[in-house]
Image (tube, rainbow, N blue to C red):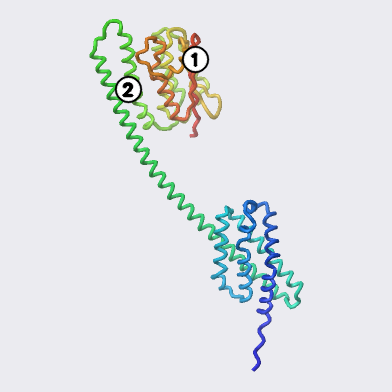
Amino acid sequence: MTEPTPPAEPLTLARFAEYLASQQSVITDRWLLTVRRDTQIETADRIATPELVDHLPRLLQELCSFLRTRDVENLTGDARRDASEHGVLRWRDGYKIDELVRELEAFRQLVASSVFHYRDANSAFDGRLEVSASALVNQFFAEITVVSVRRFMQEQQQFTRSCLQDLAQVREQLGRLTADLNHARDAQHRATTVVANELRVFLESQRPPKGVTESTSRLATFVEQLLEYAELSTIQRTSAVESFDPRVLFSEIVGTCKPVAEAKGLQLLTDCLTAPASVVGNHAIIKKIAQLLLENALEHTQSGQVSFAFSFPDAERWGIKVTDTSPGLSGADSAQLFGVNPIATDASADRGLGLAMARELAKSVGASFQSTTQIGLGTRLEVSLPKLGD
């Protein structure tokens, strides 16, 4: 009995599949050239040729197998796996998602053009078979692209989850470190307070010999400043950023310090003319900085004047400026502006802790602190504060 002749359509498609297989090197070379020339696939320029063409032969083989059988369910097997591996490798190579899609599209276009070349060389490959072959090629590459992109997204989601887990761990560690730091600050605050209070009680109970009263008085002032310094951590932790009127703040500070200037016969010059109705910042800390600067100037100026100003030169920053006609310090002694010398014999060298506190507070709110002092010309102190959004 004679065997029936196989249907023409599958045979023709099978021959087209063989043709594609024979064109593997040509298609690969053309694809490589296309990708290298595509300016929107930047990653390809950083990858060696063997790694760049890694899965193309296998993908082409799967396409040929798919065309031979015309069985769509084959896409659930090796072709899907190869597509997934292709997407994973590209992801590890640093490809962007759009680069991978463009790369696969370039491959699809080259294979699709092979349909026309085969048609021109084989008259039996009529219109219906040409349409079928083109549709199957498009279907295959559509599935490949979907699987690769899906794997891309899975890798990205996994990476994101890993980052979120790492971030959660870092936050947990930061929370523990913050708690430990707060405990340490509280312990430091308690210790400083206890020591300063003990010193104050001791000084109050003593009757210093004649001739050391001034030194004892300065030591007592230092103890009071030490107690105030111990409160810095409390101010920094409990104060918050808020909107406030700088003109009101300015008036409060001037009102507090003006009687001191009048008692010493000093002229207090003030300037807050350019201040806006509202700024955003750490009100408590900024107020403390301004008070410390002005109080320091009034304390160390024996005659002349003290100038206190709020300035608003631009939209990014604003400043506090204090100048005085104090004796000033030489270049070698300028560091004593922020030093601690409670037993200094020269009153002009005893600057206490006021400016050290102001500088530390300024640093805590992102402000810059500048000081200039010169013998006979006085001292100028400037704090430049960032303008925060509402």
| N-terminal-most mark, 2 or 1 | 2
On the rendered structure, is 372 left or right of 215?
right
Residue 308: x %, y % from top left: 47, 17
301 versus 29 height, above or below: above
| Vertical order, 188 against 257 (above or below) | below
x then y, percent, for residue 225: 35, 19
Q: Is residue 131 left or right of residue 367?
A: right
**Picture quadrant of residue 61:** bottom right
Left or right: residue 146 versus residue 127 is left
Is label 2 or label 1 in front?
A: 1
Res 316 → quadrant: top right
- Above or below for 251 versus 1: above
Residue at horizontal 66%, vertical 84%? 6
Kind of element beneath mark 2:
helix
Q: Quadrant of the N terminus?
A: bottom right
Residue 204 visible from this viewpoint: yes
Give the residue at x 74% y 69%: 117
Residue 41 drawn above or below residue 346 = below
- Residue 186 occupies which quadrant of the picture? top left
Q: Which residue is mark 1?
A: 331
Q: Residues within 10 Å of mark 2 (few under 14, many from 20)?
A: some
Of the pair 46 and 383, the residue shown nearer to us:
46
Q: Amino acid at mark 1?
A: Gly
Q: Residue furthest bottom?
A: 1
Image coords of residue 43 (percent x, y): 62, 52
Three-letter code, disc 2 = Leu
To which residue does mark 2 refer? Answer: 227
Compare residues 129 and 239 and report the one nearer the observer: 129
Mark 2–mark 1 Cα distance, whole angstroms, equals 30 Å
Q: In the image shown, does 384 or 363 lie closer to the viewer?
A: 363
- Residue at position x 37%, y 10% in the image: 345
